[in-house]
């Protein structure tokens, strides 16, 4: 193990799940003292994209929802099997997730819905011989040959009209112009999900939203061990030295309460820096106001990476990812219902009780709208007689099928109107609108990690010659793994801690379904 002392300190820029996981691994696996770890977070809450907040008056809100999975999320399970739940110290968060998913298994009865409010036979993927051949060609190409090309450069128009693409793209939030490399990685990483993509039966879910079910228990575990989280602190820069022995960070600079400050790093200290943020500059709307689309840099995560990238050629190219907001944005919305009517109607329509149905996608929707009804309650502060649902749209600049505005310009109530009519619940529209609060959230960078890229556009977790620093988050390069997952952030944290501090513990391997004979056969049957 790398030499550490009782005074060894670690500084983590950003309070997302990557930093939280890194802090756990520093204590659990590298033996650091918790009181010597500082998490520097710009926002008043930690958790990054794993959020869940609100109340009955304002409406509850989660910017996104995470669908977890057995085979692909091994580093996350490794983390969560060490963290007790908030309600039972003898039950780990992993055990709670697995038991909850056993009690409430996902098996969608309405994965795809057409313009006539008819549930489609989603088991029919609709792939032609040409579609399959194009998929095989993409999977066979090495990443350096694919380069920065887009998905729509590899497929004919028929592919994009199939049930398969409607389900795959909305499950993982792909646009046709996203990176073909990322699609290839997803196809290989989640090949085991192809036979069940129409039911989402392979999904595991948390009992509550991911902030309440994952972030809060991890925070409590860290706080009990003395870890300090400094909110309102924006890391702005780092000083580097480069010697024959390698590169080191000697100081971190930050702003707090409008004043500059810095932390000097000694010979045995470490820094872990989260680069970029997919939820940076998220803006919230209301029932009668559309959310703002923020185009200027207000969040410090992107400014930090842009500053660091100017210092070394292998620190990545942030403009590849944050330079095209219109290609990367989408909008989610959370419904707070003071009447169970909508949930009852959805259950009658789909055959799924809340928490068992997975994502419902309106395939012909001008906004390509999707909706999921989680198990209730979904928020820790949610009253028993209040219900919630969550959805999102991919095509924000198109006018709705039932409202005369684009999704980007729509208020919460206009989004609700569009949703109710997509479901065909026109007769109940008045009562649903009168008893529902909608909080839309515009996220200008939410799919930026899927931007077409070259390999060198993302830095390694531990760059060449780095002795005391690592990069974390969705914009680092981890070969074969897939971004836009909690697993990616946790795996990156594990790589950074283990490599820098010489932890003698094996990192769980990446699961390859196509090397598992049964999974490969099931996938082949589904594809054919």
Image (cartoon, rainbow, N blue to C red):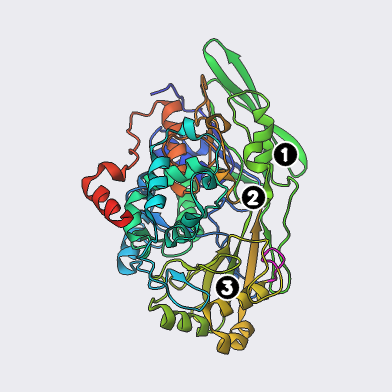
Q: Earlier in the sequence, mark 1 or mark 3?
A: 1
* Left or right position of 492 against 58: left
Q: Which mark is residue 335?
A: 3
Query: Quadrant of the rendered structure where residue 314 is?
Result: top right
* Left or right position of 317 against 165: right
Query: Quadrant of the rendered structure where residue 318 is?
Result: top right
Q: Is residue 410 magenta?
A: yes
Quarter of the figure that contains the N terminus: top left
The x and y percentages for residue 79 are 39, 46
Residue under numbered circle 1 = 255
Q: Is residue 244 magenta?
A: no
- Find the magenta span and give its range: 406-411
Q: Which mark is residue 135?
A: none
Query: Quadrant of the rendered structure where residue 431 is?
Result: bottom right
- Check disc 1: other Cα within 10 Å, few if <14, some if 14-19, many if 20+: some
Q: Nearer the viewer, mark 2 or mark 3?
A: 2
- The residue at 65%/29% (across/down) is 309
Question: Extreme bottom residue here?
Answer: 427
Q: Is residue 48 visible?
A: yes
The x and y percentages for residue 112 are 45, 69
The x and y percentages for residue 178 are 55, 46
Q: Earlier in the sequence, mark 2 or mark 3?
A: 2
- The residue at 38%/73% (across/down) is 109
Secondary element at tag 2: helix
Secondary element at tag 3: strand
Residue under numbered circle 2 = 327
- The residue at 38%/29% (across/down) is 503
């Amino acid at each position: 193990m790398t030499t550490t002392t009782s005074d060894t300190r670690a500084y983590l820029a950003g309070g997302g799940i990557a930093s939280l996981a890194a802090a756990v691994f520093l204590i659990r696996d590298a033996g650091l003292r918790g009181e010597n770890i500082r998490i520097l977070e710009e926002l008043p809450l930690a958790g990054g994209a794993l959020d869940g907040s609100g109340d009955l008056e304002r409406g509850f809100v989660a910017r996104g929802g995470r669908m977890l999975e057995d085979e692909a999320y091994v580093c996350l399970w490794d983390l969560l099997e060490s963290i007790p739940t908030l309600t039972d110290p003898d039950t780990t968060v992993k055990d709670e997730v697995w038991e909850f998913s056993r009690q409430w298994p996902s098996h969608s009865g309405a994965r795809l819905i057409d313009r006539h409010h008819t549930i489609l036979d989603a088991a029919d993927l609709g792939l032609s011989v040409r579609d399959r051949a194009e998929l095989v060609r993409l999977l066979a190409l090495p990443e350096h040959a694919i380069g920065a090309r887009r998905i729509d450069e590899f497929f004919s128009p028929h592919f994009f009209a199939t049930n398969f693409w409607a389900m795959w793209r909305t499950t993982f939030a792909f646009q046709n112009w996203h990176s073909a490399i990322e699609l290839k990685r997803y196809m290989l990483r989640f090949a085991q999900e192809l036979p069940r993509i129409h039911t989402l039966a392979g999904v595991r879910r948390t009992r509550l939203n991911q902030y309440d079910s994952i972030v809060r228990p991890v925070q409590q575990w860290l706080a009990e061990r003395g870890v300090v989280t400094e909110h309102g602190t924006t890391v702005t820069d780092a000083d580097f030295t480069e010697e024959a022995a390698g590169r080191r960070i000697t100081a971190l600079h930050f702003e707090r309460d409008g004043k500059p400050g810095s932390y000097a790093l000694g010979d045995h200290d470490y820094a872990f820096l989260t680069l970029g943020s997919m939820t940076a500059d998220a803006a919230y709307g209301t029932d009668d106001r559309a959310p703002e689309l923020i185009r200027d840099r207000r969040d410090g995560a992107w400014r930090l990476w842009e500053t660091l990238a100017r210092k070394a050629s292998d620190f990545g190219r942030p403009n590849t990812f944050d330079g095209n907001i219109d290609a990367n944005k989408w909008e989610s919305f959370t419904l707070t219902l003071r009447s169970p009517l909508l949930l009852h109607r959805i259950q009658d329509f789909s055959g799924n009780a809340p928490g068992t149905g997975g994502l419902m996608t309106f395939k012909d929707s001008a906004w390509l709208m999707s909706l999921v009804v989680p198990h209730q309650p979904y928020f820790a502060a949610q009253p028993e007689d209040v219900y919630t649902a969550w959805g999102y749209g991919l095509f924000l600049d198109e006018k709705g099928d039932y409202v005369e505005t684009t999704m980007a310009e729509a208020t919460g109530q206009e989004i609700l109107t569009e949703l109710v009519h997509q479901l065909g619940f026109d007769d109940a529209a008045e009562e649903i609108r009168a008893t529902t609060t909608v909080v839309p959230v515009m996220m200008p960078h939410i799919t930026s990690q899927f931007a077409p890229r070259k390999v060198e556009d993302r830095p390694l977790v531990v760059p060449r010659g780095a002795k005391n620093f690592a990069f974390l988050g969705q914009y680092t390069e981890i070969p074969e793994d897939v971004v836009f997952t909690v697993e990616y952030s946790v795996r990156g944290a594990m790589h950074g801690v283990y490599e820098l501090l010489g932890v003698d513990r094996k990192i769980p391997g990446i699961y390859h379904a196509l090397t598992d004979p049964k999974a490969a056969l099931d996938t082949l049957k589904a594809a054919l």
